């Protein structure tokens, strides 16, 4: 049984309808499709979605400040960790941090429902860094394993670790595809306390007998639902099978509680504390609408009009296929827009550089496959445009969650 750590029940996704239903409710679906990113890409049929669910008038909602039960000073962290928290300019714990940190410090398993941008990385990193600092003092060689669905998210977690674990004499390795494996092997052999990576590369390193999790007693699965969506289930189960069952603390974080996620939690979590900081399917301050087109030419023309409008300051455009991302990028560059793109075939360094350019406003349009839908904290995105209809409503929710953050107004448009 889950121990409920807050009174609000977790919301289920994909059941309520938004907006008034048009006279003719168009639907789509019924085609087999492949997703990029995972090893096993076999999926079922795409979900049939009523287009009226993409229409909802946004309301500007002032974000009420969360009143935390704790301050960071209340947590019994090493003095150096407290210095790192101050250096990171963390003031008061965010809801997921306030509710999860005490349970993680007690060594309990946790299942946290939280979206990207809610502060969950610090919610698991801070108490796990504290745990390793303590065991280090007892001459124990203990490893923490953190799995994430995309290389960008894994590298972001690793970057956060370096900031929060600064000056403590503990080290991490980022195990992701697309970057030199020999360098990762070299770092592992030098000795690391935190292994942070994607399931595919971690499994490769286990197969090469480089990674040994016999001294691992802490496991984090971040964006667990996304990893399942990307076809990583077999790799996740294989890797978890290499971690001792006894004295293992397992932390799952997910934005949804799908049957697959629930099955995984039943299999690998022991009497977990359940925490939900998700308030609804989509943010209330996101204007959601559809753009109807009859041809490719009209579609591009209408996109051009949207991008030229005042207020389209920072735009994230989603496409289903990698080659479609490249094609649209060329079209918009030809029109004179500052645009970049990321997808699974791009080299890691190129993807990292493009994301940095978008974050720093050196480009104001980013075109991506769903690799960018989750796990990336990109501030101040004004518009999310679904140039291709998402395969499922959950995917739609994750995509448009890139805008309307921190109480700001956002716009989500879906071409149909």
Image (cartoon, rainbow, N blue to C red):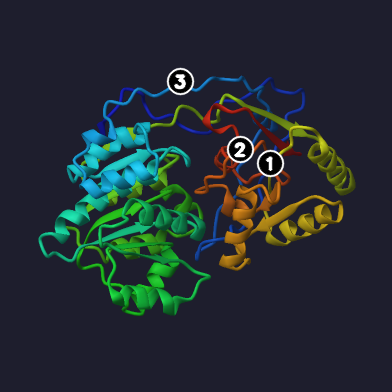
Q: Residues within 10 Å of mark 1 (few under 14, many from 20)?
A: many
Answer with mark 2 or mark 1, whichever residue precedes in sequence. Answer: 1
Quadrant in the picture for residue 247: bottom left
Q: Is residue 95 visible?
A: yes
Real-space Cα distance between discs 1 and 3?
Answer: 25 Å
Vertical comparison of 86 with 160: above or below:
above
Where residue 383 sits in the image (x, y, percent)?
68, 37
Real-space Cα distance between discs 2 and 1?
Answer: 7 Å
Residue that numbered label 1 is attached to: 314
Q: Secondary structure at mark 1?
A: loop
Task: Give the residue drawn at x 51%, y 62%.
Answer: 38
Residue that numbered label 3 is attached to: 64
Q: Secondary structure at mark 3?
A: loop
Vertical comparison of 6 with 314: above or below:
above
Residue that numbered label 2 is attached to: 380
Q: Secondary structure at mark 2?
A: loop
Answer with mark 2 or mark 3, whichever residue precedes in sequence. Answer: 3
């Amino acid at each position: 049984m889950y121990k409920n750590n807050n009174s609000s029940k977790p919301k289920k996704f994909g059941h309520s309808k938004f907006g008034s239903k048009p006279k003719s409710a168009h639907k789509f679906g019924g085609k087999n499709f492949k997703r990029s990113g995972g090893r096993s890409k076999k999926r079922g049929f795409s979900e049939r979605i009523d287009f009226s669910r993409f229409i909802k008038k946004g309301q500007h909602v002032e974000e009420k400040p969360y009143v935390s039960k704790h301050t960071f000073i209340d947590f019994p962290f090493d003095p150096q960790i407290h210095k790192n928290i101050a250096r990171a300019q963390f003031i008061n714990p965010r809801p997921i941090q306030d509710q999860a940190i005490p349970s993680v410090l007690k060594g309990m398993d946790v299942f946290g429902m939280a979206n990207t941008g809610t502060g969950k990385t610090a919610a698991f990193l801070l108490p796990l860094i504290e745990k390793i600092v303590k065991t280090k003092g007892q001459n124990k060689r203990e490893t923490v394993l953190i799995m994430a669905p995309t290389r960008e998210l894994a590298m972001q977690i690793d970057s956060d670790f370096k900031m929060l674990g600064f000056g403590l004499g503990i080290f991490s390795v980022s195990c992701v595809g697309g970057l030199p494996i020999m360098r990762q092997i070299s770092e592992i052999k030098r000795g690391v306390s935190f292994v942070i990576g994607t399931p595919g590369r971690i499994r490769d390193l286990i197969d090469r007998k480089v990674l040994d999790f016999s001294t691992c007693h802490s496991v984090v699965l971040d964006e667990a639902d996304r990893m399942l969506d990307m076809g990583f289930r077999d790799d996740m189960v294989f890797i978890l099978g290499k971690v001792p069952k006894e004295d293992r603390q397992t932390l799952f974080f997910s934005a949804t509680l799908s049957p697959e996620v629930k099955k995984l939690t039943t299999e690998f979590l022991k009497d977990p504390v359940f925490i939900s900081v998700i308030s609804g399917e989509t943010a209330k301050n996101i204007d959601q609408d559809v753009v109807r087109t009859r041809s490719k030419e009209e579609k591009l023309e209408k996109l051009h009009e949207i991008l030229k409008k005042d207020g389209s300051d920072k735009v994230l455009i989603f496409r289903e296929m990698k080659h479609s991302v490249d094609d649209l990028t060329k079209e918009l560059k030809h029109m004179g827009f500052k645009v970049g793109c990321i997808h699974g075939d791009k080299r890691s360094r190129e993807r990292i550089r493009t994301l940095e350019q978008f974050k720093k406003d050196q480009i104001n349009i980013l075109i991506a496959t769903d690799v960018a839908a989750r796990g990336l904290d990109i501030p101040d995105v004004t518009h999310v445009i679904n140039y291709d209809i998402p395969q499922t409503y959950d995917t739609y929710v994750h995509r448009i969650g890139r805008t309307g953050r921190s109480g700001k107004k956002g716009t989500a448009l879906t071409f149909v």
